[in-house]
Amino acid sequence: MPAFFVVLAKVGERLRADVPRKPANSFLEETLANKPVLDEADNSYRLSLPFQAVTVKQGDNLNFAVGISRGQNFSDEVAIKLEGLPSGVSQVNDRSSIERDKSDSQLVLKAADDAALGEFTVKVTGHTTSSEVDATDEFKLTVTSPSP
């Protein structure tokens, strides 16, 4: 980021090169000099799913990973929440977060024998309690009846 300096002098007065000049906005200069400037992406994350659409049969399990792409300065644990699961489909494992030192979380969905049939949009939300940063992704889940 370029810094602009304003130097005022009396007419006829010479500026001395050995005298340090303060920038017009010294607060900004000190802030930039003393603290790293974070790009918005540096302190954020993005969730990734292995599919945009997937099918599960009634009575079956669906195993998949929710991945995370972390910004340079982001290391928080991320809680994973699924919304929009159809009636009869539930998350059966306890892994509902991506730990600080991990790149994904393995989830297991169970479609009951009487799970609602059809196509549903499932929203996956990642949330951090320390920084209150959320990220979302979604996929289409189709529940079908088992083959005869």
Image: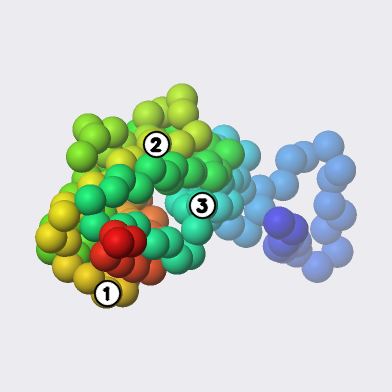
Q: Which quarter of the rendering shows the N terminus?
A: bottom right
Which mark, residue 105?
2
- Which one is closest to the eye, mark 1 or mark 3? 1
Percent coordinates x, y for residue 125 in the rendering: 31, 55
Q: Which residue is mark 3?
A: 50
Q: Disc 1 to disc 2, how far (Cα)?
A: 26 Å
Tell me the amino acid under the disc marked 2. Answer: Ser
Name the disc covering residue 118, or none: 1
Residue found at the very far top of the displayed protein? 101
The CA distance from mark 2 to mark 3 is: 12 Å
Pick the front one: 68 or 115 = 115
Could you classify mark 1 by the number of other residues whose Cα lies within 10 Å: few (under 14), some (14-19), or many (20 or more)?
Answer: few
| Mark 2 or 3, closer to the camera | 3
Q: Amino acid at mark 1?
A: Gly
Name which residue type carries label 3: Pro
Tag 1 secondary structure: strand
Residue 137, quarter of the rendered image: bottom left
Residue at the (46%, 25%) spot, across then down = 101
Residue visible at 41% across and 28% down in the picture: 100
